[in-house]
Image: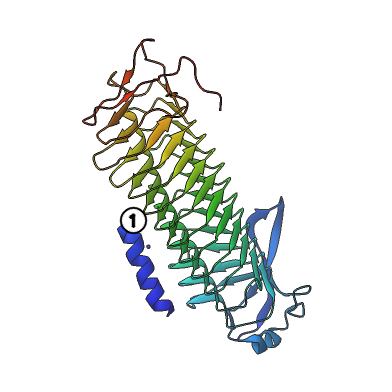
Amino acid sequence: MILTRKTMLIAALTTALLALSAVAVTFIVLEVRDNDPITYVEHDPIVIWGDDDFDAYKFPGKGTENNPYRISEYNITTDSYTGISIWNTKKYFIIENCYINASAIGISIESVDPGSAIVTNNICNSNAKIGILVYDSPQIVLSKNTCRYNGYGLVIDSSSSCLLTENICKNNNVGIIIFYSPLASLVKCESLNNNLGIYVGYSSSSSIDDCKINYNNEGLSIDSSPAFRIEESEISSNTYGLLMIKSRSSIIENNDFNHNYYGIFLHENTLAYFNHNNITYNAYGMFFKTGVDTSTISYNYFERNYIYAINIELSNDNNVIHHNTFVNNSASGMSQAHDDGLNLWYDIYSNSGNFWDDWIGIGSYTIDGFGGNSDLYPLETPPVF
């Protein structure tokens, strides 16, 4: 089953652009956590294929919710396929403060009981396939891990309601992957200098909050994941800031999209809400490719997007754009937006449009494009956010 899922995962990523005892020797790995270096104990790979295997390792703890087993402060640098592998368990456990460098996967957690595992403050470095993998294991917590120079940094596959908080993924092929895992929550994570920063596929009602997604080729890719939320995040210096495909009823608000080529790139999305975002210094602030319908773009700030603040191609209709601020967009000196579709550039209930700093002060504001659209009610002053 896991092989089938991995095959599907690689295909989906291509479309969007993817038991041995401890040795009693210690050494210092030059990593600093909370201002203190961690002293690791060298350890052979850890393989646990059921609850009984925990006993063989004699980890501290009793495997209960209040006193979980603790796999802590090990250096596992190995040619083995996986550094730590835990499968088909019901006991509670914590993997913490470990350094893992295996040939393929650093930490693998598969088919464990819901909520039974916490993976925190580990470093997974130069694993050829995956830094940390969670498969078929709901409600797992991953916090404060660093994954770098791996194929994929963090992978959550077929595992609902997982929480990822304060993880750092950098210099991987893909930083973070959420796949067939609804209700995932990413909070205060950083994904930097990857080919693809974060990929979320087929994972409804998931969210990203207060994350930094910077200096990737493709920043954040949302694929077939309805009711997705992105809030309070910084998405900058990517080729694609946000790439959203087939993700109905999503909410994107209070984010900064800056210095990307495409700040936001949309394809086949409906009923999305883009509110209170700062969209600045991109080539295109927002780019509607095709099939983007019945969405609302309001109370956003667009400044110095070089080509257009908003570019809407054919077959994108019935979107409503109002109460936005447009300042010094489009280096061509023409309209700050372009629209080939049939869309409404004002709010029909209040007869209020958008603020355009190049509006002459009388009449409507003409939008470039074959759609023949205009903002009939330009605002004299920028709207209050």
Question: Foreground: 46 or 206?
Answer: 206
Quarter holding residue 302: top left
Q: In this rendering, does residue 239 appear at all? A: no
Task: Please state, as top left, top right, bottom left or bottom right, where the N terminus lies in the image.
Answer: bottom left
Above or below, 355 relative to 256? above
Residue 167 % position (x, y): 58, 55
Q: Circle 1 sits in a helix, a strand or a loop, which is it?
A: loop
What residue lies at 46% left-to-right and 14% top-to-bottom?
380
Residue 184 in view in this figure: yes
Q: Furthest residue to the front? A: 349
Q: Quick check: 77 left or right of 322?
A: right
Q: Residue furthest left?
A: 370
Q: Badge 1 local density, few (<14 within 10 Å), some, or many (20+)?
A: some
Indicate whether 62 appears above or below 373.
Answer: below
Q: Is residue 353 above or below residue 37?
A: above
Pointer 1 residue: 16
Residue at horizontal 36 percent and vertical 54 percent from the top? 246
Quarter containing the C terminus: top right
Residue beneath the point at 66% across and 89% down? 52
Residue 243: % across, % down: 38, 48
Residue type at tag 1? Ala
Q: Nearer the viewer, residue 373 or 223?
A: 373
Task: Determine whether, in the image, residue 130 is placed left or right of residue 341.
Answer: right
Q: Name the spot of residue 274 as percent of width and height, x first.
A: 46, 39
